[in-house]
Image (tube, helix red, strand yellow):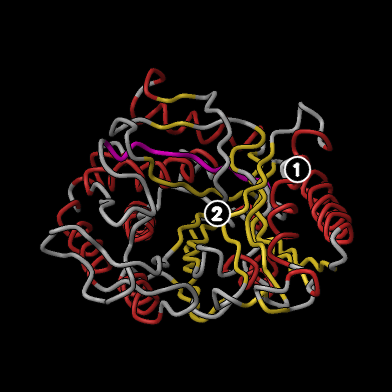
Amino acid sequence: MSPLDAIRRHHAELTAFRRDLHAHPELGMAEFRTAEKVATALEALGIEVHRGVGGTGVVGVLRNGSGNRAIGLRADMDALPMDELTDLPYRSTVKGAMHACGHDGHTTMLLGAAKYLAETHNFDGIVHFIFQPGEEGCGGALAMLEDGLFERFPCDAIYGMHNRPNMPLGEYAINSGPTAAGGAFFDITITGKGSHGARPEVSIDPVLAACHVTTALQSIVSRNLSPRDAAVVSVTKVVGGDAYNVIPETAVISGTARFFAREVGAQIEEGLKRVAEGVAAGFGASASLDYRLIFAPTINDAEQTEAYAAAAAELVGDAKVARDKPPGMGSEDFSFMMERVPGAYIYLGNGDGAMPHNPRYQFNDEAIPYGAALYARVVEKGLVKDSKG
């Protein structure tokens, strides 16, 4: 029996688990209930459990045979700080929190793989089931790494996945090399001299300077980076002043940068500082930059990409596995783990529906067997069991 067929036998149980997580979402680094439910479920399967890794992270360890090779499988557990606008019977019961990215589904798929592998033991080696907190810009991957994730649970390869709405159910997409962008957040504080709104001549207007800085920042991608280097610099917030008749002392420009190589991110950081300081100085103001790397670029290792794609093709056929997915400008903090261990990150179809981070997003429970089976099959292929065993 294929992993897909075997896991489908537990589909109702897994769906119920996922919907319970959906109804009780928890924000990044505060996934206490979620983590305990995961840990308890793993223990019920006879899997060795380690709680509190990197805060609320959970790692399950399953060994079989005499092999020392280890594979890590990772899923994220956190929800987003937003209200749900669906009419689902299991919609969020927590105000200001919603599983709008499908992490409840990712967690359930990894648990489904753990259940299958604990039942079949069709591998020789070690599997580390990594349930990560705080993916949504909360530093969860780094927290687990700083807590000795790969020193305590060494892996020879690591795999992750994400659902993709408006991609057909039962299909997968992957590519070798950059697959998701690195991401940084920035704040530029412009400091001038406040005044009455009727006396601009005695002010140094930080709002005016901020507007010019915002426009000039667009030159970083168009004129400072090579056309071969895809990147985005987006100003998403400009805040200055509290009253109609007061020119304030300060204004703050905030936004995000996206890139596929760390060196390009460093170029953007330098450009933000140079442009902001130079333009502000032209108005007699000063500028200071706070630049924070939140996500590293997600780079798929060629060998692990092929292993993942081959495992997917065994489940659904080559025609349903796209191996040339264009890189996307979204970000994923699994990237920090993949900088330490060769790995691959794949997308699986979620069927038609709202995109992630939308209050009407819905994870498709029919995708659960496809994700769980792929996690399981890549382990079976990577930790091949001796036919005599």
Mark 1: which amino acid? Ala
Q: Report the disc number at residue 193.
A: none
Mark 2: which amino acid? Gly
> What residue is pinned by disc 2?
125
Q: Residue at 50% x, 63% y: name it.
A: 136
Q: Which residues are magenta?
A: 341-351
> What residue is pinned by disc 1?
261
Callout 2: SS: strand
The outermost residue toward the front is 198
Q: Quick check: 263 left or right of 321?
A: right
Who comes first in sequence, dot 1 or dot 2?
2
Callout 1: SS: loop
> Quick one: 370 or 234, which is closer to the camera?
234
Mark closer to the observer (1, 2) = 1
Q: Residue at 39% x, 54% y: name it.
A: 357
Query: Is the residue 199 above or below the residue 211 in the image?
Result: below
* In magenta segment, residue 145: no
Return the x and y of residue 155 as percentages of the image width and height: 63, 56
> Quick one: 218 or 95, which is closer to the camera?
218
| Quarter of the rendering occupied by the N terminus | top left
The outermost residue toward the left is 89
Return the x and y of residue 141 as percentages of the image width and height: 60, 65
